[in-house]
Amino acid sequence: MESPVPVKPSNPVPNDRLFFVLPNYLMVEGPNRVPSLPVKTKFLFTAKTMSDPVTISFLGGIALIGQARDSAPIYGQGLKGYGKRYAAVYADTGIGTLMTASVFPMVLHQDPRYFQLGSGGFRRRTLYALSRIFVTRGDSGMCSLTIPRSSVTVSPPASRTCTIQKASAPLATPWASGPATQC
């Protein structure tokens, strides 16, 4: 008697890439009905993004440019100065990613993923993408109106670097009047 083939559990954080290189874990292609993310998975997105070799290398490149320009003389030069710059860039990016992909979505009960439209012409898809600035999907699957604002995370004052991350806060009313609509 043959044993049934074990079912492989689905990975909560897919290994999606843009151009086969850049990490792209927060985009959902195709299905309109997907389950909401558990809080733990929202934090896994941040952990996977910040531990991705491409992210680590990219941030190393940014620190290297800062080293070459001597953008923050207080860090000094050499390996020690580069290490300080790298730590500042990594911490700044990590905090921004943590807040926008995990903490804000957890507190505001939002889904941090971008749900790709997948069909329609260029104009329709472009308008849909632009609407995602103002409309977000909640953990319940319903659309809610958001007020976009920027949260600025700044590295230590000596580094003179600033990164703007997009954050959002939902309004109390759903996107459509009447019954709540699926997003």
Image: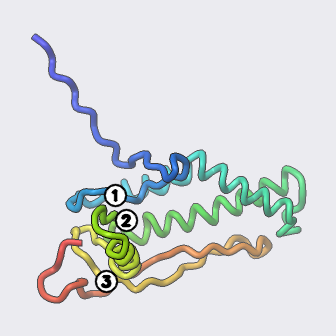
What is the quadrant of the C terminus in the image?
bottom left
| Contact? badges 1 and 2 (CB < 8 Å) | yes
In front here: 137 or 105? 137
Q: Which mark is residue 87?
A: none
What is the quadrant of the N terminus in the image?
top left
Figure check: 142 above or below 40:
below
Q: Which residue is mark 1?
A: 28
| Image-based side of 36 in relation to 19, left or right | left
Q: Determine the residue located farthest toward the top in the rendered image.
A: 1
Marks 3 and 2 sit apart, C-alpha to C-alpha, by: 15 Å
Residue at horizontal 22%, vertical 69%?
Answer: 140
Marks 1 and 3 sit apart, C-alpha to C-alpha, by: 20 Å
Q: Which residue is mark 3?
A: 145
In the structure shown, which secondary structural element does the residue marked by tag 2 occupy? Answer: strand
Q: Which residue is mark 2?
A: 114
Crowd class of label 2 (few under 14; some 14 to 19; many from 20; radius 10 Å): some
First in sequence: mark 1 vs mark 2:
1
In front here: 54 or 158? 54
The label nearer to you, 3 versus 2, is 2
